[in-house]
Image (cartoon, rainbow, N blue to C red):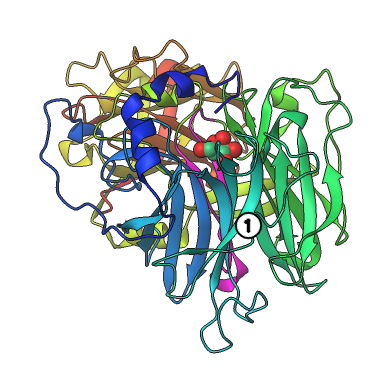
């Protein structure tokens, strides 16, 4: 892209990628997914996640077109079919019945001679409002961003919203003949990421899309997904992060504290850079939506730093998060891209680059007098954990020491739950993916002096691939009743920490050796109590 924030994109575009683009002529799927490739000496199977989706090969970024339809969860995503670097943006596709086990499908929409296919969303047009299917066989409809090239009839680099539809349940996609369906006047190079949902109280489709460099979310409505009418702009009175980009917006309703009579609206705005953990991250606002305008309850002042804003995740690797359309029981299920634009192009995995975070369920809870998003792993992941063989320790007191858990509680892929009472210890917590000698490992602990949860990946294996790879992520989190509950999802390439049943989440990529699988607890400068430690190996 042309953003000054991402010079790597230009550098990583090879001649062969341009040639491939020139040769590709269709946006509909026609190639079966790749299934087997010869391994190469540069491959990194030790970092291939088992609980998180990764494409078999090549580059992946944002989740796109998250939709549940006929018993299947569809995950489309920004994908380069031709290489392990950002470019030739197309929509990859994977499906799952349980949000944990994914099957890669054929590429859904390909970059071609005149455009690349940037992020967007998919809805099930069950009443065939678009007329692009039939009453008996309604279509899936995708709204995505076309990024035009020379020869397209638009100035190269222009971004506008286009429509594609599928009448075979998402397997193949046709472009709408009168694309784009929505463009700005004059056309913009930063107008992208349409997210569409059904606004039931108004009986119309609602779209949010960004003008990324202007920090504006634009809202539109439509009766047929083709003709869009402008509703309003959402921006901040004093943007504290000029120069950053707003991307991948999402607006949805949630019941506050589980009470359906107290509905609030949540606006997710992904911002890059300026995230709470540095680089890119998912910010959100809670407020009201009247069918035209979203008004946040309160917004921090211009001089604020990221800590005055609300974040879906406090780690470095959770971006472009959005919700599923048509999710069972109206749940707010999200997936985020587990990477950060600060260093995504340097992530040392091969033959793929990019992973999705664990699907999560969002809810809205009043904490300290303020509505806050709680995020927990999706129910189907929790069921998998409950079905897996687990090992438990009722209580373990540790005094200024580090303790190895039993060998059966070690592992490179684990779900760990425990309650920490830091007591008199200055720091108390866990080490995961530790080496036998104890000199490396990812530390997840409570810092009593700072009253904060810390994830420290400064000794987590390969940390040298980028200077921008941040080492420590700290979340202010006063203890409740002197204790902290943690759920830690450990995979071959990541840790995801959920504190106090969703009060905060921290997601970080890590690059340890595969044999670094020790799990330890530790207390520094005092006595800490660890209780109800449960370690499971979900598969
Ligand atoms: C977010 C983003 C989107 C864009 C896509 C391009 O990560 O920059 O704004 O549509 O990635 O791949």
Residue pictured at 64% horizontal, 82% vertical: 127
Q: Residues within 10 Å of mark 1 (few under 14, many from 20)?
A: some
One can see residue 96 in this view: yes
**Relative image position of residue 472 (x, y in whole percent):** 48, 18
Q: Which residue is mark 1?
A: 179
**Relative image position of residue 469 (x, y in whole percent):** 44, 17
Q: Is residue 73 above or below residue 462?
A: below
Residue pictured at 21% horizontal, 36% vertical: 410
Magenta residues span 315-338
Q: Is the C-beta of the residue carrying label 1 under 8 Å from the nearest atom of ligand 1?
A: no
Side of 221 relative to 472 (left or right): right
Q: Quadrant of residue 22?
A: top left
Q: Is residue 428 above or below residue 191?
A: above
One can see residue 425 in this view: no
**Relative image position of residue 523 (x, y in whole percent):** 40, 21
The quarter of the picture showing ligand 1: top right
């Amino acid at each position: 892209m042309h953003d000054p924030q991402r010079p790597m994109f230009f550098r990583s575009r090879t001649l062969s990628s341009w040639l491939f683009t020139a040769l590709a002529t269709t946006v509909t799927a026609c190639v079966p997914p790749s299934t087997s490739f010869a391994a190469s000496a540069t491959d990194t199977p030790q970092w291939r996640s088992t609980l998180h989706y990764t494409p078999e090969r090549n580059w992946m970024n944002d989740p796109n077109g998250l939709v549940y339809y006929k018993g299947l969860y569809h995950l489309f995503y920004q994908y380069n079919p031709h290489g392990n670097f950002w470019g030739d943006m197309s929509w990859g596709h994977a499906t799952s019945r349980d949000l944990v086990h994914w099957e890669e499908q054929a590429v859904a929409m390909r970059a071609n001679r005149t455009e690349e296919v940037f992020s967007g969303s998919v809805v099930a047009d069950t009443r065939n409002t678009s007329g692009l299917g039939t009453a008996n066989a309604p279509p899936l409809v995708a709204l995505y961003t076309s990024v035009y090239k020379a020869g397209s009839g638009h100035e190269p680099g222009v971004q506008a919203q286009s429509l594609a539809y599928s009448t075979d349940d998402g397997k193949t996609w046709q472009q709408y003949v009168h694309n784009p369906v929505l463009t700005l006047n004059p056309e913009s190079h930063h107008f992208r990421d349409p997210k569409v949902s059904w606004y039931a109280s108004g009986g119309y489709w609602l779209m949010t899309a960004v003008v990324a460099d202007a920090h504006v979310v634009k809202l539109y409505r439509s009766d047929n997904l083709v003709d869009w009418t402008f509703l309003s702009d959402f921006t901040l009175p004093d943007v504290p992060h000029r120069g950053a980009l707003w991307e991948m917006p999402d607006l949805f309703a949630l019941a506050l504290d589980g009470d359906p009579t107290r509905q609030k609206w949540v606006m997710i705005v992904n911002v890059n850079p300026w995230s709470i953990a540095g680089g890119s991250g998912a910010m959100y606002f809670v407020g009201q939506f009247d069918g035209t305008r979203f008004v946040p309850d309160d917004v921090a002042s211009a001089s604020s730093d990221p800590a005055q804003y609300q974040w879906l995740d406090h780690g470095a690797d959770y971006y472009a998060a959005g919700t599923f359309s048509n999710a069972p029981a109206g749940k707010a299920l999200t997936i985020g891209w587990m990477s950060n634009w600060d260093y995504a192009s340097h992530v040392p995995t091969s033959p793929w680059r990019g992973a999705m975070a664990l699907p999560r369920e969002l809810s809205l809870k009043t904490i300290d007098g303020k509505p806050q998003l709680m995020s927990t792993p999706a129910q189907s992941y929790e069921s998998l954990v409950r079905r897996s063989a687990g090992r438990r320790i009722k209580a373990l007191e540790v005094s200024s020491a580090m303790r190895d858990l039993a060998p059966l509680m070690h592992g490179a892929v684990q779900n760990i739950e425990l309650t920490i009472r830091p007591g008199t210890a200055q720091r108390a917590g866990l080490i995961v993916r530790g080496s036998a000698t104890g000199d490396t490992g990812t530390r997840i602990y409570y810092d009593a002096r700072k009253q904060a949860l810390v994830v420290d990946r400064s000794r987590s294996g390969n940390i040298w691939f980028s200077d921008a790879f941040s080492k420590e992520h700290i979340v202010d989190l006063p203890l409740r009743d002197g204790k902290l509950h943690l759920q830690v999802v450990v995979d071959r390439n990541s840790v995801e920490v959920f504190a106090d049943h969703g009060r905060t989440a921290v997601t970080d990529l890590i690059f340890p050796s595969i044999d670094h699988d020790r799990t330890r607890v530790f207390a520094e400068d005092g006595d800490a109590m660890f209780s109800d430690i449960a370690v499971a190996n979900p598969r």
